[in-house]
Image (cartoon, grey):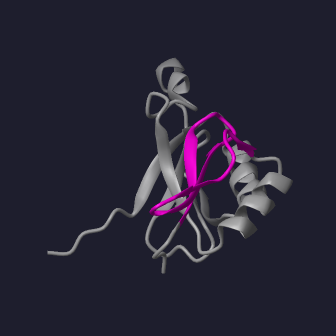
Amino acid sequence: MKQRIANISLVVKDYDEAIEFYTQKLSFNLIEDTPLSETKRWVLVAPPGSTETCLLLAKADGEEQLKSCGNQTGGRVFLFLNTDDFERDYASMTANGVKFLESPRYEPYGTVAVFEDLYGNKWDLLQLKNYQ
């Protein structure tokens, strides 16, 4: 049997502001932006070089979903952005106004720093010692 996670749904307040954040601040690629109805779109973004998993930017539908924007995991780190060059990406993201919640840490497994997306979801920027 072969399976993989193709997309991870991320609840957003607005498609266009989310696309702008991910493509301009994090340098992700816009993979697809297809209208499905007057209010829904199929929007996929992914980091450069990513071929397996995309983020599906899903606009909140109603108050309950809107409450989860920025807190999809109850305050824990939600997503892990692995990189082959921590210093390059940390400098670029900082220059682009991405909010880091800590200075880089050098752990036995690699270099890491927690940052927030535009809604407050926590991410790890992470260069593993054995990243390929």
The N terminus lies in quadrant: bottom left
Horizontal side, residue 7 vs residue 45: left or right:
left
Q: In the rendered picture of this protein, how many numbered marks are placed on residues? A: 0
Which corner quadrant of the image does residue 100 belong to?
A: top right
Vertical side of 73 occupied by 49: above or below = below
Judging depth in this view, the residue of 98 and 42 nearest the camera is 98
Q: Residue at x 45, y 63 (%)?
A: 109
The span picked out in magenta is 99-127
Q: Residue at x 59, y 75 (%)?
A: 84
Residue 51 belongs to magenta span? no
Q: Predominant secondary structure in magenta?
A: strand
Which residue sits furthest left? Answer: 1
Which residue sits furthest bottom? Answer: 132
Residue 107 belongs to magenta span? yes
Horizontal side, residue 101 vs residue 50: left or right:
right
Horizontal side, residue 46 vs residue 72: left or right:
right
Residue 120 pos. (x, y %): 63, 34
Asked whether residue 43 is in view, the answer is: no
Residue 115 pos. (x, y %): 64, 45
Vertical side of 74 occupied by 125: above or below = below
Judging depth in this view, the residue of 91 and 5 nearest the camera is 91
Q: Residue at x 57, y 37 (%)?
A: 121
Asked whether residue 8 is in view, the answer is: yes
Q: Residue at x 53, y 22 (%)?
A: 67
Which residue sits furthest right? Answer: 95
Residue 107 pos. (x, y %): 51, 57
Residue 93 pos. (x, y %): 76, 56
Horizontal side, residue 53 vs residue 19: left or right:
left
